[in-house]
Structures are given as structure tokens and as C-alpha cells.
């Protein structure tokens, strides 16, 4: 076999190996960057981060060339400002496909075209051409014999859904019913996904305290903060799943099932203005780390446990030219000089590590001023649903102290925190716990038996 043939086989094997696990996590690359690195440098960054799926908001030709023969799956975009031309002219749509897709495959592994971005909620004057544009582009893909390799869809924002919670009763905004019906028919007939931009950061901020921050960040919820759908009795441990299920329910309300949801943008800003306290590095790291783990464990959502949700993280670089508050320019995980805003891996993260190097010398201890009844409630949760290892504080064991609930709770709280912090676990427990960097003198049992710092 020729060298070229061997390379093709190797590339195919790599793709099969990666896709065997189900859902994937990709990355968005925006264009609102003043000093965007060269296409070759961007691809080098993708390889270094082991990112195998990328969403381009346009069809930058330099990027498409640089992505050739990498095996990276590429989603290209028809920008909103080109939508009207494509949707009003079949020849224009065919020309777009020929110049931006057909000219680069198979070397560049283009698998999806995203038509516009949040079209119905950002440029409603183009609503009437959304479906015709999809149909024209599909005809062009068919003519180029690319209709099986390249799928078509259009990303929507959560603003398309009226009253997204509880998820079971969510519906699309009735204003767009005449558009959504043929749109969903198109997705169903072509085997395409419903593209959703699911941003719990916006949901948390707009909720103004209705939902706890832990719920938005995939962090464990205390018993009195559990979120349930009253109609289905399904419990939601995070806002992301609730948003995805709201999209499924909205489609079901229009008598469509079997259309998978693909999340085309989800992330968290790492910096914000004075009135944006939730936009910080700690929250961004927690959200994106937990999102990656959640997607790659292929668990689906409460109402769709067998439907995995592939997701594109938002985003690779900060877009300093984006309009809006400070947070809007600071969603990137990388600086343009190739240094990381914070450390993030796009591979599945092992969950059996019971201690984090970042926590060495840090103690999660019970708040001695907390009411004993509150400590007891938190202790019951952490040793039960929280899955802390509480064997050493059981009656008859070496750390059992029936008259010192602060010491006993501290043991359990700290075990939980060190086991789960890397995946978003916190030291709070409704205010009954706190972080300490000094060795609490009365926790000798805890220090001698549990800590490995």
C-alpha cells in the first residue's frame, strides 16, 4: 500500500477510535479577535489540547487548509450576514457549498454546516429564508454527492424556548411556530441534529438567585437545594441538562421525536465587570471541567438518558471585539499567545482520585458556630447521597466521637471535599463548613488518619 494509503487508513482508524465512545466535546473559534493567531498556529494548539472537533463561525479558507489531513472534524458556518443571499438564491447556495465545502473535502474533514447563529432571535427579518436556505444548501450538497458526509442545521438560543423550567412543559415561542414546523421537518428528513446554544451562565444571571450557583456549575447540591421537575419527578443536578431537556420537550410539543440535540455553544466567562461577580476564573474552570466530564461520561439527560449530548465549548480565544459587558469578551480558555487562561483537558477525567494536589494543606472543617441540627443535616447528606467515606466515624471506630459533632462532621466534610473538589465539589454545606489552612487542634484523629498532605 502507498504511503498516502497508509495515512488514509491511519486517519480513518483514529476517527473510529475517537467516535467509539459516543458523545464528544469540541471547541468554538470566533472571529472577534484583534490578534488572532495564524491558522497553522491555531491548529497546533488544537492538536496540543487533543481537540478533535472544532466549530468555525465562518468558513475561513486558511483554517480549512490548515485543518487538512489532521482528522479533526470541522463544522463550518454560514455567517448571519450571508444568510439572506443564500436563502434567496439557489445558485448562490450552490456556489457557497462549492467554494467553502466541496473545494476542501475529503482532505479537510467537514461534517456539518451551521446556518447562521441564533437567527430567529437576533435577526428575525431573515426568519422567512431560514428553511429555504437549508433546502438550497441541501440540494447543493446532494449535487456534490456530499449529503451523507455533511449535515445541515442552524443553532438556536434558549430564548427560543418559552419558560424553559420545568423542562417537561417547555415549548418554543409561538411567534416562530410557522418557521419551526418546516425547520424540524427538515432536520427529521435529513437526519440532522437540533443545534442549541446552552449557556447556564446566562440562565444563572437572569435567574437573579432563583437557582443556586452550584446548580449552574454542575456542583453537588445539598438536600434542601435539589431541583426537580414537578411533572415528571425527575431530579436535575445541573442547569445544562435542564436546558437540553427543555429543547427535547419543545420539539415533542410539536410532535417531533428522534431528533438529537447537539449543543453548539456552552461555556463560562472567566472575567467580568464589577456587577458580574459570577464571571471569574474559579467558576469558569469548574464549569468547563465539569461540562467536559459530564458530556464524556455519555450519561444523557434525566428525560433522555440514552441520548448523548455532543457539545462545543465556548470558546478557544477571548473575543475582545464582542459587544456588551466585560464578560462578553472573556469566554476563551486560551490567550492568543498560546498560553492557557486556566488548565483544561479535553479528555475524560478520572474520577477515582481521592485527593487533589491543589488542596494540600487545605482543610474543609465544620463551622463551630453552626447549629448542631444543621450540622447533623449536612452530615447525613455527605455520608449518604454525598458518598463520603464515613466508615471511621461510625460507632466503635477510631474517629467516632458521639459528643463532638463538629469533629465528626469535619472528618466527613473534608473527605467529601478532597474526593470531589476536582469535579466541582465545594466546602460549604449550607454554611455549616469552611476552608481552613491551619490544623484544627481538636481534630487529631482526622489529621493522623485521613490527611495525606
Image: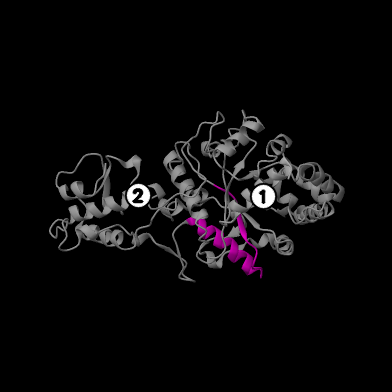
Which of these two is toward me, 88 or 93? 93
User: Which stretch is magenta?
Assistant: 239-266
Q: Which of the 4 quarters of the picture holds residue 39?
A: top right
* Count of marks overlaid on the render: 2
Q: Residue 122, image x and y in percent?
A: 66, 48
| Magenta span contains residue 253 | yes
Question: Judging from the image, what secondary structure is the residue with disc 2 in?
Answer: loop
Q: Which residue is mark 2?
A: 426
Q: Is residue 216 left or right of residue 387?
A: right
**CA gap, disc 2 and disc 1:** 42 Å
Question: Judging from the image, what secondary structure is the residue with disc 1 in?
Answer: helix
Which of these two is toward me, 23 or 232? 23
Residue sitting at the far front? 1
Q: Which mark is residue 12?
A: 1
Which of these two is toward me, 417 or 224? 417
| Magenta span contains residue 178 | no
Residue sitting at the far left? 403
Q: Residue 50, image x and y in percent?
A: 56, 42
**Badge 2, how many Cα within 10 Å: few under 14, some, many 20+?**
many
Amino acid at each position: 500500500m502507498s504511503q498516502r494509503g497508509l495515512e488514509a487508513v491511519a486517519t480513518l482508524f483514529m476517527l473510529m477510535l475517537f467516535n467509539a465512545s459516543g458523545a464528544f466535546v469540541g471547541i468554538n473559534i470566533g472571529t472577534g479577535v484583534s490578534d488572532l493567531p495564524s491558522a497553522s498556529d491555531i491548529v497546533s494548539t488544537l492538536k496540543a489540547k487533543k481537540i478533535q472537533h472544532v466549530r468555525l463561525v465562518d468558513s475561513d479558507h486558511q483554517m480549512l487548509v490548515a485543518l487538512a489531513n489532521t482528522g479533526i472534524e470541522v463544522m463550518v458556518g454560514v455567517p448571519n450576514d450571508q444568510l439572506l443571499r443564500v436563502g434567496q438564491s439557489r445558485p448562490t447556495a450552490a456556489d457557497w457549498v462549492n467554494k467553502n465545502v466541496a473545494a476542501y473535502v475529503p482532505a479537510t474533514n467537514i461534517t456539518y454546516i451551521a446556518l447562521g447563529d441564533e437567527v430567529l432571535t437576533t435577526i428575525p427579518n431573515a426568519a422567512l429564508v431560514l428553511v429555504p436556505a437549508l433546502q438550497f444548501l441541501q440540494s447543493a450538497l446532494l449535487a456534490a454527492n456530499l449529503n451523507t458526509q455533511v449535515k445541515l442545521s442552524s443553532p438556536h438560543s434558549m430564548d427560543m424556548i418559552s419558560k424553559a423550567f420545568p423542562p417537561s412543559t417547555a415549548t418554543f415561542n409561538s411567534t416562530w411556530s410557522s418557521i419551526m414546523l418546516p425547520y424540524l421537518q427538515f432536520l427529521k428528513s435529513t437526519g440532522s441534529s437540533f443545534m442549541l446554544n446552552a449557556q447556564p451562565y446566562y440562565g444563572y444571571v437572569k435567574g437573579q438567585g432563583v437557582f443556586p450557583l452550584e446548580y449552574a456549575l454542575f456542583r453537588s447540591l445539598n438536600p434542601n437545594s435539589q431541583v426537580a421537575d414537578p411533572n415528571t419527578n425527575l431530579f436535575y443536578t445541573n442547569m445544562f441538562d435542564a436546558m437540553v431537556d427543555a429543547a427535547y420537550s419543545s420539539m415533542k410539543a410539536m410532535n417531533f421525536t428522534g431528533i438529537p440535540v447537539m449543543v453548539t455553544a456552552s461555556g463560562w466567562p472567566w472575567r467580568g465587570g464589577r456587577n458580574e461577580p459570577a464571571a471569574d476564573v474559579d467558576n469558569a474552570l469548574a464549569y468547563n471541567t465539569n461540562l467536559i466530564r459530564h458530556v464524556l461520561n455519555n450519561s444523557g439527560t434525566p428525560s433522555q438518558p440514552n441520548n448523548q449530548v455532543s457539545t462545543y465549548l465556548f470558546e478557544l480565544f477571548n473575543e475582545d471585539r464582542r459587544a456588551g459587558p466585560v464578560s462578553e469578551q472573556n469566554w476563551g480558555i486560551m490567550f492568543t499567545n498560546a498560553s492557557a487562561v486556566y488548565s483544561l483537558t479535553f479528555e475524560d477525567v478520572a474520577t477515582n482520585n481521592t485527593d487533589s494536589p491543589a488542596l494540600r494543606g487545605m482543610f474543609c472543617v465544620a463551622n463551630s458556630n453552626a447549629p448542631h441540627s444543621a450540622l447533623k443535616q449536612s452530615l447525613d447528606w455527605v455520608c449518604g447521597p454525598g458518598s463520603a467515606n464515613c466508615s471511621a466515624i461510625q460507632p466503635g471506630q477510631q474517629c467516632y466521637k458521639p459528643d463532638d459533632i463538629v469533629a465528626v462532621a469535619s472528618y466527613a466534610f473534608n473527605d467529601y471535599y478532597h474526593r470531589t473538589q476536582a469535579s466541582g465539589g465545594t466546602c460549604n454545606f449550607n454554611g455549616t463548613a469552611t476552608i481552613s489552612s491551619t490544623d484544627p487542634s481538636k481534630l487529631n484523629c482526622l489529621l493522623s488518619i485521613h490527611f495525606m498532605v
